[in-house]
Amino acid sequence: MILSLQLGFADWVALFNHFLSLSLLAVGGAIITAPDMHRFLVDDNAWLTEQQFSSSIALAQASPGPNVLFVAVMGWNVGLNAGAGLGGGWISVGLSALGVFLSLLGIMLPSSVLTYTTTRWAHRHRDKRAIKAFKQGMAPVVIALLVSTGWLLTASHDNPARDWPLWLLTLVSMLLVWKTRIHLLWLIGTGAVIGAIGLI
Amino acid sequence: MNESPPLNVPRSKTDMFITFTVLALQGFGGVLAVVQRELVEKKRWMTQAQFLEDWAVAQIMPGPNVVNFCLMIGGRHFGLGGALASMAGLLMAPLAVVLILASVFGGVSDAAWAQGALRGMGAVAAGLIAATGIKLIAALKNNPMGIVMCVAVMVSTFLCVSLLRWPLIWVLLGIGSLACFWAYAQLTKLATNRTQA
């Protein structure tokens, strides 16, 4: 379903500003700001339908590349909704492209500028004891965060009777990545097929 | 880990752009596992320990951690141009793919088979991320904190995040800063021992 929106200049600015304001809050990935995007895009402004919102995230997860691209898909859908009001066609594509551009630029510009300048500074001072201590001290924390991410993704399926095949799949792929050099795409593809035919 | 063969360096900004494009197009359900495998194990642009240090920074800065990571690597080798080339590589091809998928399959993602495929890919991706973490444990070998302290930090972080479900920020501020202080103290001790010797 596509909405029919009339978005003015101020609305596009508001869209850009919203993503801009979330950028620096996204410690650990843009996905942690998704609840606020939902509030803004679906609840407050009704620029996206519930279904468009959730399928934007699902689609970006299913396709290759950084997960932050779900933001681009949201911008694309907002543009599509705005374009339908003008008769679709090339205007629709143009507005969708504008939506992609503004949303991605907004979510990435502040964090990227901050990261780039901070890490350039840190690299110039990499022999300072404080910088070394920071990196060495955080190293075991980061390892634990990675393992925790795997754990949390698995534990969100919390019904042992129903979900044990999912857990098994996670465990087997973990062991294969750890112990073999099998190409990661084989694993992902196998997971998709097993899921699509309804085995898990 | 055998560190004897020397590391490679990226040849040019184009090299970085292509490398990150190829890498991003393989990254389903998160690019981290692919980054580690391509840059450390295949291209050998960095050691396991360097990867871990850089990833720690990329993870702590706001913004998508893979984007942060490629900004850092690109910037280190070729300055701002390298950072932008890496980031463009990471984003452009996957952006095209996801938008094509969005316009062609926009409605399909609610179908049962598509949901099932997503579940299956998600389960595998969880395993990939966990395995990458486990592989990086080897890189703690030369950590000045000592292996006992490293294990203690890892176990307590895992417990707080996975089982107690603390917000990330408190884990970083609490356990993270304690670990950094401890590392600082150990580095100071090492430095004084070295000057005395």
Image (cartoon, rainbow, N blue to C red):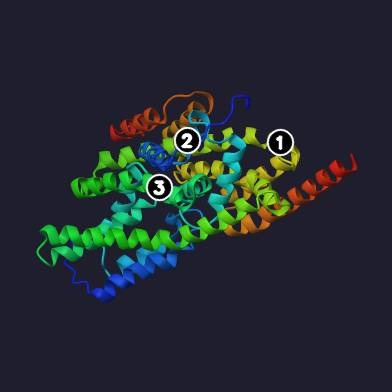
Mark number displayed over residue B54? none
Residue B92, above or below A92: above
Residue B92, above or below A96: above
Q: Residues within 10 Å of mark 3 (few under 14, many from 20)?
A: many
Query: Mark 1 — residue?
Result: B142
In the rendering, at what x and y percent does residue A122 appear? 61, 54
Tell me the CA gap for discs 2 and 3. 27 Å
Query: Mark 2 — residue?
Result: B128
Q: Nearer the viewer, mark 2 or mark 3?
A: 3
Split into 4 quadrants, where in the image is the N terminus of chain B?
A: top right
Residues indicated by labels 2 and 1 sit on the same polypeptide chain: yes
Label 1: chain? Answer: B
Label 3: chain? Answer: B
In the rendering, at what x and y percent does residue A20 appear? 40, 66
Tell me the CA gap for discs 2 and 1. 25 Å
Query: Mark 3 — residue?
Result: B85
Please, which residue is most extreme toward the bottom here?
A10
Residue B144, above or below A30: above
Q: Quadrant of residue B26?
A: top left
Q: Quadrant of residue B151?
A: top right
Q: Secondary structure at mark 3?
A: helix
Label 2: chain? Answer: B
Reading the chain from its start, which is encountered first: label 1 or label 3? 3
Residue type (three-letter) at the residue carrying disc 1 = Asn
Q: Residues within 10 Å of mark 2 (few under 14, many from 20)?
A: many
Residue type (three-letter) at the residue carrying disc 3 = Ala
Q: Residue at x 32, y 44 (%)?
A: B94
In the rendering, at what x and y percent does residue B54 appear? 57, 45
Q: Quadrant of residue A23?
A: bottom left
